[in-house]
Image: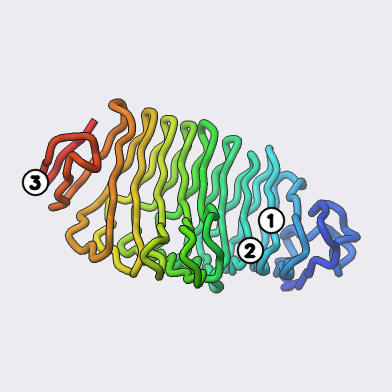
Amino acid sequence: VVHAVSATWIGGTGSYSDDTNWDVPMVPCNTDVMLFQITIPADIGIVSDDVGVCDVDIFSLGDNSEFRILDGNNYTVSGQADLFGIIQGAGGDFTALSAAFPGNQARAHAELGANIVIGALDYSSAGLPGAITLFSATNPGSVLDLSSLQNLDAGFNDGNSTVGAHSVVAADGATIDLSGLVSVTAPARAEDVLEFYVDVNGMMDLSKLNSIDGGGQVAFVLSRGAELRIGDLVGATTTTVIRLNDPDTTLDATGHSCLRGQEQHHPYRCGPRRMLQ
């Protein structure tokens, strides 16, 4: 007989492998007879996964709490993962094929060769202030797989005229897969921006993106050997800027996006498909 077992984090910043941080007298990873339902509450600091390979059934991460998967560790959620806080792959892997971002302050980052897979459909950063990175992948081999994501709402309103930016960053040979993303909402205020930044041989896939709206701006910035795959932006109704900062960057654009040289440092080009380098 297999039993469902609830396990709630009761410590502050600490190690997953320390059973005194849990309200159950064990380290909660699935066994042949127990399937764990994990709750990490809001505002508890950083929980570092250091137990090697660990599978759990259900996973909930609270606002302003961080779940950090250390190098050499692999954490898999076989059922539902509700992510209000921060997933940080610090060389370790995290997989949640059935996932959601129910709040508006979640973030996810992959570094040091981490592979992070989050199967959420919708995302909002409306509860976060400006000047913050929402998603990032850095260092060679790191992958942040958000290919299930269809809608990204960065419609924050900070209530002041200071420029604020929400960023999605792929850099240093890392990849962010947003190949299922269809719709993007810019910040609410005209001076604020949602920036997709690809740098130093990074790659970002936005090949299905076709709708951009909102009161603010959306920018796509490529530098130093970066590659961006972008969709048909005929549905863009807000200010959209594309900047290729170096001659060795690549923009692979599909559909009917019209790209003007003043923004891209290239001649005006318009057509069903083009590759700019």
Front: mark 3 or 1: 3
Q: For the residue labelled by badge 1, is the local secondary structure a helix, a strand or a loop?
A: strand
**Position of residue 75 in the picture relative to residue 230 (left or right):** right
Q: Earlier in the sequence, mark 2 or mark 1?
A: 1
Q: Which residue is mark 1?
A: 67
Measure how far apart labels 2 and 1 are at the Cα level.
8 Å
The x, y position of residue 184, in whole percent, is 35, 63
What is the basis of the colouring in this image? rainbow
Q: Closer to the camera, 72 or 89?
A: 89
Which residue is at a point 58% across and 40% down the rendered structure image?
111
Label 2 Cα neighbours within 10 Å, binned few <14 / some 14-19 / many ≥20: many
Callout 2–callout 3 Cβ contact below 8 Å:
no
- Residue 127 lies, with reference to residue 32, above or below; the image says below
Res. 275 image quadrant: top left
Which residue is at a point 50% across and 68% down the rendered structure image?
160
Q: For the residue labelled by badge 2, is the local secondary structure a helix, a strand or a loop?
A: loop
Label 1 Cα neighbours within 10 Å, binned few <14 / some 14-19 / many ≥20: many
Q: Which residue is mark 2?
A: 85
Which residue is at a point 78% across and 69% down the rendered structure image?
7
**Position of residue 214 in the picture relative to residue 47 (left or right):** left
Q: Which residue is mark 3?
A: 271
Front: mark 2 or 1: 2
Q: Earlier in the sequence, mark 3 or mark 1?
A: 1
Callout 2–callout 1 Cβ contact below 8 Å:
yes
- Residue 22 lies, with reference to residue 269, above or below; the image says below
Q: Amino acid at mark 1?
A: Phe
Q: Amino acid at mark 2?
A: Gly
Q: Quadrant of the N terminus?
A: bottom right
- Residue 249 lies, with reference to residue 58, above or below; the image says above
Res. 150 in view: no
